[in-house]
């Protein structure tokens, strides 16, 4: 490679020539000719399209075209190098793109963190839900009113204990629905109204706090 060819502009100039030899497509060629090398970061060469040619950008990201460009890049650079196409054609445009990338990554992280919490929480509430079914099955004389009363009393204590960890200070709708599901299971098993179970649960938790 000629002296100075390691500069982004020289590498891209030679890549454009080789990439055009690999695929004959008028719009693809035009996109290559209008593209501008901005910088190299690691194994990426950052390539921009000036605003007046932005409608051509998609011709560089089509799978076959992108693969041809990356092959040409690796050959010219003598090492693995891939194209990252951005909007704009300056170093400032690249910094703006990186800032947007960081913002999107943080948004995704927040979404996944919330999803992970919900999955873990759902598993815990699910355990409580299943426990209500097992305890009712194991309740002595459960077909009698006093048997059902013993079951309700036991489950209210269990749910109140579990809520120490499962119930945040300001529960969201997801958490409220998980508790409602457990309450409905207890109520259906004991053949009593769900609001009654919810009321007794609130009273028990209030007594404990007092």
Image (spheres, rainbow, N blue to C red):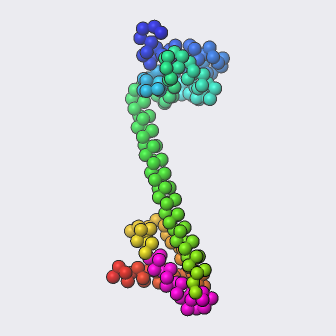
Q: Which residue is drawn at the image coordinates 56% and 13% (left, top)?
A: 17
x%, y% of residue 137?
A: 60, 80
- On screen, residue 110 versus residue 72, left or right, reads left
In reply to whether residue 14 is colored magenta, the answer given is no
Is any atom of residue 49 visible in this view?
Answer: no
Q: Which residue is drawn at the image coordinates 62% and 88% (left, top)?
A: 143
x%, y% of residue 69?
A: 57, 22
Q: Which residue is drawn at the image coordinates 47% and 58% (left, top)?
A: 117
Q: Nearer the viewer, residue 184 or 24?
A: 184
Can you say which quadrant of the picture contains the C terminus?
bottom left
- On screen, residue 113 versus residue 209, left or right, reads right
**Where 142 falls versus 177 (above or below)?**
below
Q: Nearer the viewer, residue 137 or 14?
A: 137
x%, y% of residue 175?
A: 49, 67
In reply to whether residue 155 is colored magenta, the answer given is yes
x%, y% of residue 194?
A: 55, 81
Is any atom of residue 91 visible in this view?
Answer: yes
What is the residue that sits farthest to the right in this orientation?
A: 24
Main secondary structure along the magenta-highlighted residues:
helix
Q: Nearer the viewer, residue 156 or 50?
A: 156
Q: How many marks?
A: 0
Q: Which residues are magenta?
A: 141-160
Q: Which residue is drawn at the image coordinates 58% and 87% (left, top)?
A: 140
């Amino acid at each position: 490679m000629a002296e100075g060819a390691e500069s982004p502009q020289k590498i891209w100039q030679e890549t454009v020539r080789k990439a055009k030899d690999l695929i004959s497509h008028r719009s693809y060629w035009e996109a290559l000719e209008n593209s501008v090398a901005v910088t190299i970061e690691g194994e990426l060469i950052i390539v921009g399209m000036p605003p007046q040619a932005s409608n051509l950008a998609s011709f560089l990201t089509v799978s076959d075209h992108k693969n041809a460009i990356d092959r040409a890049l690796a050959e010219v650079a003598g090492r693995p190098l891939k194209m990252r196409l951005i909007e704009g054609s300056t170093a400032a445009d690249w910094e703006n793109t990186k800032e947007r990338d960081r913002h999107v990554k943080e948004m995704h992280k927040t979404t996944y963190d919330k999803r992970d919490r919900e999955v873990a929480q759902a598993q815990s509430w699910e355990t409580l839900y299943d426990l209500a079914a097992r305890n009712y099955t194991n309740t002595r004389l459960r077909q009698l009113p006093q048997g059902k009363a013993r079951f309700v009393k036991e489950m209210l204590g269990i749910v109140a204990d579990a809520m120490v960890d499962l119930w945040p200070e300001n529960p969201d709708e997801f958490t409220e629905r998980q508790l409602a599901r457990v309450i409905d299971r207890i109520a259906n098993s004991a053949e009593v109204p769900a609001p009654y179970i919810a009321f007794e649960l609130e009273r028990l938790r209030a007594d404990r706090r007092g």
